Amino acid sequence: MAQADLGIPSGLEGLKEHYDLVIVGCGLSGGVIAERASKELGLSCLILDKRDHIGGNCFDFIDPKGFRISRYGVHLFHTKEQRVWDYVNRFSEWLPYEHRVKGRVNGVIVPIPPSQTTVNLLFDAKVHSEEDMEAWLEERRVDCPNPTNGEEAALSRAGPQLYEAIFKHYTKKQWDKFPSELDASVLNRIPVRLNTDDRYFTDPHQALPKHGYTRIFENMLLNDPNITIRLSTDFFQVRSGLPAHSLLVFTGPIDAYYASLGLPKLEYRSLRFEEEYHEPETGFFQEALQVNYPGQEVPYTRIVEYKHKPNQPEGVKEMPGTVIFKEYSVDEGDPYYPVPNPDNQALYEKYRDMALKEPGVCFVGRLASYKYFNMDQAILTSLEMFDELVEKGTIKKKE
């Protein structure tokens, strides 16, 4: 539910004179810090968010046609961290779900990441075992023991055929840079499987919240007398009028916090979504929740069809129609993906050094860290930051 449905006001009217924590951002990082500070220490928290909803980029809702969709792109929970799994189970019932991504390559549907099945379908490789797959790759790998960029990393792991078919042009669409212009770590994140495992993730815990991600935040934050939320409220516009507070927790872009100093901005990629409604004969538009388009033939990177998700409301699977979202990677818009290259890293380190010296402020989360976090990483770093604040005596249990 959004702001009007929840009855959450905007602005600073009606607030207390003092809060233990003022938290900027009502996404995963801010939500976890607030929930822990309240439940463990009894501290009062004021959360501000410039958007008109709680949940940050995890926000999902039921659209007018009855589909549960995510406003900021598909979110898939997976983790190997038992602490994180135990934590999220406090706030939701979960449905087992193992994500499988398909790619449409020259009209052929193949598993992503590449596996035995992928190379057999695309190149008639005739590999039938892990040994066959390793031999097929080894014949094609380019010798480069210390890759200095994404192209070298991909060629050294997958060879030129898979690089051209799967990696090269998808990367260009995603980052507006060819792999040769990006750090090697970007391409190293994408595995090449020796087996036939077509799951996108291999973590032991993979699931979707039965009632959606927004419900998690409702259960975490609402109806807690220690937590006050103000939506459609921009921290930078109300900064001078904030109530007194013992600690400011900032989860936004670290460069935005220091914008008044006139330093350059960090580089991000954003996303644009193009929604379409269809009524296919089968009831579904495509083979899976997510189909990637690695080639140059279309400008979008992938199509997401939420009807495939098992946490759709009852009756959605039987509906004749379906809604799809074509996803475009763009320069302008909400910051999603930090662009990893030496210049951006050097600039971030300048901001980080300033942040470490900033009195009374704690920076936490993907935007404040200039790193891409999966959901479980965002939760874990926030839990660990809370532990660190307690251990250092920065925040203490209310007497």
Image (cartoon, rainbow, N blue to C red):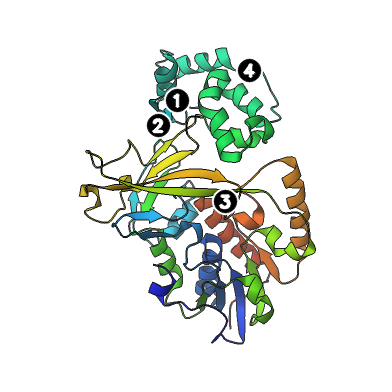
Q: Is residue 346 above or below residue 240?
A: above
- Residue 255 is marked as none
Q: Sequence-wise, which precedes: disc 2 or disc 1?
A: 1
- Residue 336 is marked as 3
Q: Sequence-wise, which precedes: disc 3 or disc 1?
A: 1
Query: Label 1 sits on what residue type?
Result: Ser
Q: Could you say which quadrant of the image residue 89 lies in?
A: bottom left
Residue 374: x percent and y percent? 52, 49
- Residue 198 is marked as 2
Residue 353: x percent and y percent? 78, 57
Q: Sequence-wise, which precedes: disc 1 or disc 4?
A: 1
Q: Is residue 202 left or right of residue 244?
A: left
Mark 2 in CB contact with mark 1 (< 8 angstroms)? yes
Label 2 or label 3, whichever lies nearer to me, is: 3
Q: Is residue 142 left or right of residue 32?
A: right
Q: Which residue is mark 4?
A: 142
Distance from Cα at disc 3 to Cα at disc 1: 28 Å
Near-viewer residue (385 or 74): 74
Label 3 or label 1, whichever lies nearer to me, is: 3
Distance from Cα at disc 2 to Cα at disc 4: 25 Å
Q: Is residue 91 visible?
A: no
Distance from Cα at disc 1 to Cα at disc 4: 18 Å
Q: Is residue 342 visible?
A: yes
Residue 304: x percent and y percent? 40, 44
Q: Which residue is mark 1?
A: 115
